[in-house]
Image (tube, rainbow, N blue to C red):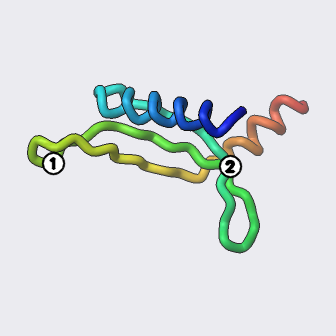
Amino acid sequence: MSIQSHRLLLYLFFESILAGESVTSEAKILRKNGSKVDTEFSNTRIFIGETPYMHTTARDITKRMQTEEALRES
């Protein structure tokens, strides 16, 4: 995927959140020590005064992903 495609996807992602849609996504993130963590991001629009902001909560879902993989393999 090209950088331009990524930019368009990010733009659409942010626009949908700022329009009021809640968006949940998953990604692997890299820690400083080099280990990878399966992470879930929950994104919602909030207002401070009349200004809209994006609030993101991230949580480690590594164990859940390992459990799901073990179930698929059994």
Residue position for label 1: 48
Count of numbered tags:
2
Amino acid carrying label 1: it is Ile
Task: Indicate the secondary structure of the residue bearing disc 2.
Answer: strand
Q: Residue 28 carries which label?
A: 2
Q: Residue 24: x, y in percent?
A: 49, 34
Graded by Cα atoms within 10 Å as few (under 14), some (14 to 19) or many (20 or more), the crowding at tag 2 reads some
At 56% from the left and 43% from the top, the residue drawn is 40
Q: Quadrant of the C terminus?
A: top right
Q: Which residue lies furthest to the bottom in this view?
A: 33
Graded by Cα atoms within 10 Å as few (under 14), some (14 to 19) or many (20 or more), the crowding at tag 1 reads few
Q: Is 31 situated left or right of 14 in this image?
A: right
Q: Is 55 situated left or right of 66 in this image?
A: left
Q: Residue 64: x, y in percent?
A: 67, 43
At 59% from the left and 53% from the top, the residue drawn is 60
Q: In which quarter of the image is the N terminus?
A: top right
Q: Residue furthest front?
A: 4
Task: Indicate the secondary structure of the residue bearing disc 1.
Answer: strand
Amino acid carrying label 2: it is Lys
Q: Residue 5: x, y in percent?
A: 61, 31
Mark 1 and mark 2 residues within 8 Å of each other at the beta carbon:
no
Q: Is 41 situated left or right of 63 in this image?
A: left
Considering depth in this image, is 53 or 10 the residue closer to the camera?
10
